Image (cartoon, helix red, strand yellow):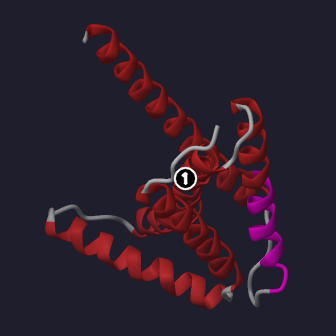
């Protein structure tokens, strides 16, 4: 049975390709460029914190910078990619659900490893297993949240059909 592709199926696929490309491109940036990117975001957060009247010590600022790099630069970007990878697989792959999940998680593991491998060739950067773990954790969290949301939507749809 062939399903009809809606406009949002194409959007999910485009966002999957865009987020995957962004991960690969960002992994190739030098340490200096990567640090400048996270510093820009950190400066925005510091302005918000200052506006709220919160004073941070130098140690707290350093920890915040590490958090920004790891939580946003690794976890959040891979979380977004996990969401759109799963949605693309859900609507575009014609396999069983278990097979789709196998391919999706395999892709996430491959992408996490590839993004760290690319850093071997980026000046002032290097791969770490910790970063690959953070990457894959973000990806997995995105997939799991998406699966759970789709289950809830499907169950509500089934309940509404039974009610009518």
Identify which residue is drawn at 77% across, 46% down: 103
The vertical placement of 126 against 78, above or below, is below
- Give yes or no for residue 111 being in the magenta stretch: yes
Foreground residue, 35 or 118?
Answer: 118
Q: Does the magenta stretch mainly form a helix, a strand or a loop?
A: helix
On screen, residue 37 versus residue 120, left or right, reads left
| Outermost top residue | 163
The vertical placement of 39 against 115, above or below, is below
The vertical placement of 69 against 153, above or below, is below
Foreground residue, 31 or 150?
Answer: 150
* Figure quadrant of residue 154: top left
Identify which residue is drawn at 68% across, 89% down: 30
| Outermost front residue | 1
* Figure quadrant of residue 97: top right
Foreground residue, 131 or 149?
Answer: 149
Residue 55, horizontal then vertical, whole percent: 25, 64
Q: Can see residue 47?
A: yes
Identify which residue is drawn at 39% across, 29% down: 153
Quadrant of the image containing the C terminus: top left
On screen, residue 67 versus residue 29, left or right, reads left
Quadrant of the image containing the N terminus: top right
Foreground residue, 19 or 36?
Answer: 19
Q: Report the span colored magenta.
A: 109-121
Q: Which residue is mark 1?
A: 79
Identify which residue is drawn at 40% across, 82% down: 40
Residue 84, horizontal then vertical, whole percent: 54, 55
Q: Can see residue 71?
A: no
Residue 52, horizontal then vertical, whole percent: 15, 62
Residue 54, horizontal then vertical, whole percent: 21, 61
């Amino acid at each position: 049975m062939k399903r009809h592709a809606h406009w949002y199926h194409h959007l999910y696929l485009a966002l999957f390709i865009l987020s995957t490309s962004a991960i690969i491109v960002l992994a190739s940036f030098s340490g200096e460029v990567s640090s400048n990117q996270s510093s820009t975001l950190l400066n925005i957060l510091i302005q918000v914190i200052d506006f709220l009247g919160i004073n941070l010590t130098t140690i707290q600022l350093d920890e915040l910078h590490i958090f920004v790099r790891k939580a946003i630069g690794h976890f959040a970007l891979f979380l977004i990619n996990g969401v759109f990878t799963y949605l693309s697989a859900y609507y575009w792959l014609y396999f069983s659900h278990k097979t789709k999940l196998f391919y999706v998680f395999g892709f996430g593991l491959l992408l996490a490893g590839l993004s760290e491998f690319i850093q071997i060739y980026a000046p002032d950067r290097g791969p770490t297993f910790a970063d690959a773990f953070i990457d894959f954790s973000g990806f997995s969290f995105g997939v799991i949240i998406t699966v759970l949301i789709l289950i809830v939507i499907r169950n509500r749809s089934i309940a509404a059909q039974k009610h009518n």
